[in-house]
Image (cartoon, grey):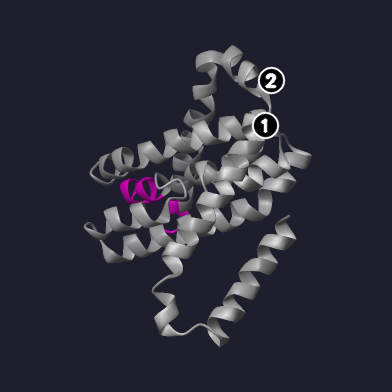
């Protein structure tokens, strides 16, 4: 699966460079949205046909909230450690980490603070998503299904969900979706709080 993702991105770069005109480029966002909706529709079908997964999630109760909480704490602490290596203040590095992989929103929110920090947030969170897409199958295979949700962060509810669903099981896919929703909802709250500390 990871090889297919890397190959698809590589082919897309070649196709875009060689064949895509400026007139067609204005429609790429619409095409991406349609493709993502179709992909998530089929992931939903796969999740919905497994009735046992829903009962297992119900039995977990509020403990399910520990997964996004731990991913959030780990992401922010990891970015603070990375910030020390780059000589960044704690408020800046933690705000970048609080993007949880949602590169468009976090970089736009930090643009008001600093264009350099906005660029760092964009690059960091795009890198997180790419690393997640490549590493999720390996994390699932060698560490565990629930652990495979962590690299995705906020993207566990959209772009990374098909990879998580394919690499794990229906229960983990449902938890990934819930985790992605919670982390995505946290980004517009945590980024302004952390940057203003």
- Residue 157 is covered by the magenta coloring: no
Say if 175 sits above or below 194 in the image: above
Q: Residue at label 1? A: 170
Q: From the top left corner, tell me how far across and down residue 139 is, in percent.
A: 71, 43
Say if 144 sits above or below 154 in the image: above
- Is 140 placed left or right of 181 in the picture? right
Q: Earlier in the sequence, mark 1 or mark 2?
A: 2
Range drawn in magenta: 83-96
In the rendered image, which quarter contains the N terminus?
Answer: bottom right
Q: From the top left corner, tell me how far across and down residue 22 is, in percent.
A: 41, 83
The crowd level at tag 2 (other Cα within 10 Å; few <14, some 14-19, many 20+) is few
- Name the residue rendered at 39%, 44% in the picture: 98
Report the predominant secondary structure element of the magenta stretch: helix
Element class at badge 2: helix
Considering depth in this image, is 190 or 21 the residue closer to the camera? 21
- Name the residue rendered at 54%, 42% in the picture: 156
Q: Which mark is residue 114?
A: none
Q: Can residue 42 be seen?
A: yes
The crowd level at tag 1 (other Cα within 10 Å; few <14, some 14-19, many 20+) is many
Residue extending farthest right: 142
Q: Quadrant of residue 60?
A: top right
- Residue 91 is covered by the magenta coloring: yes
Q: Can residue 88 be seen?
A: no
Element class at badge 1: helix
- Name the residue rendered at 47%, 43% in the picture: 154
- Is 31 placed left or right of 41 in the picture? left
In the rendered image, which quarter contains the C terminus?
Answer: top left
Q: Residue at label 2? A: 52
Considering depth in this image, is 96 or 156 the residue closer to the camera? 156
Q: From the top left corner, tell me how far across and down residue 2 is, in percent.
A: 71, 57
């Amino acid at each position: 699966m990871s090889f297919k993702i890397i190959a698809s991105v590589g082919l897309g770069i070649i196709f875009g460079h060689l064949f895509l005109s400026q007139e067609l480029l204005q429609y790429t966002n619409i095409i991406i949205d349609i493709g993502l909706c179709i992909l998530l529709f089929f992931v939903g079908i796969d999740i919905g046909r497994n009735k046992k997964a829903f009962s297992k999630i119900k039995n977990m109760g509020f403990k399910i909230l520990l997964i996004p909480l731990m991913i959030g704490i780990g992401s922010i602490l990891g970015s603070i450690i990375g910030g020390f290596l780059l000589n960044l203040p704690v408020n800046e590095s933690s705000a970048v980490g609080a993007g949880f992989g949602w590169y468009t929103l976090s970089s736009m929110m930090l643009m008001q603070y600093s264009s350099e920090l906005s660029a760092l947030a964009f690059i960091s969170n795009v890198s997180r998503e790419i690393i997640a897409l490549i590493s999720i199958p390996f994390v699932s295979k060698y560490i565990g299904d629930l652990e495979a949700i962590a690299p995705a962060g906020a993207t566990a509810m959209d772009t990374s969900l098909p990879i998580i669903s394919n690499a794990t099981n229906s229960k983990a896919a449902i938890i990934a979706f819930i985790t992605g929703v919670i982390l995505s909802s946290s980004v517009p709250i945590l980024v302004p709080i952390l940057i203003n500390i």
